[in-house]
Amino acid sequence: MDSWKLWELDPAESRRTGIKSLATEWLR
């Protein structure tokens, strides 16, 4: 629930978080 909030707060950091989230799901 904080991911989308961070997205609106910091698009730059959200991008990094999104990539990390995708990588984590892909690794799984």
Image (spheres, rainbow, N blue to C red):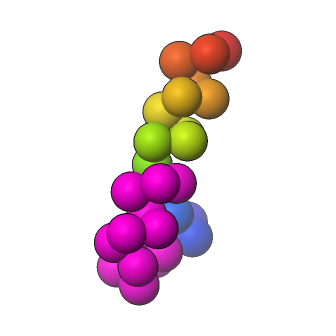
Q: Residue at x 53, y 18 (%)?
A: 26
Of all residues, the one furthest to the bottom in this rendering is 9
In the image, 18: left or right of 25?
Answer: left
| Image coords of residue 16 (percent x, y) | 47, 54
Q: Residue at x 45, y 48 (%)?
A: 18
Q: Residue at x 43, y 64 (%)?
A: 14
Q: Quadrant of residue 4?
A: bottom left
| Image coords of residue 3 (percent x, y) | 51, 63
Quadrant where the C terminus lies?
Answer: top right
| Residue 4 visible somewhere in the drawing | no
Q: Residue at x 48, y 33 (%)?
A: 22
Quadrant where the N terminus lies?
Answer: bottom right
- The magenta stretch spans residue 8: yes
| Image coords of residue 19 (percent x, y) | 45, 42
Residue 4 against residue 9 in the figure, above or below: above
| Image coords of residue 20 (percent x, y) | 55, 41
- Magenta-highlighted stretch: main secondary structure? helix
Q: Which residues make up the magenta segment?
A: 4-17
- The magenta stretch spans residue 11: yes
Residue 19 against residue 14 in the figure, above or below: above
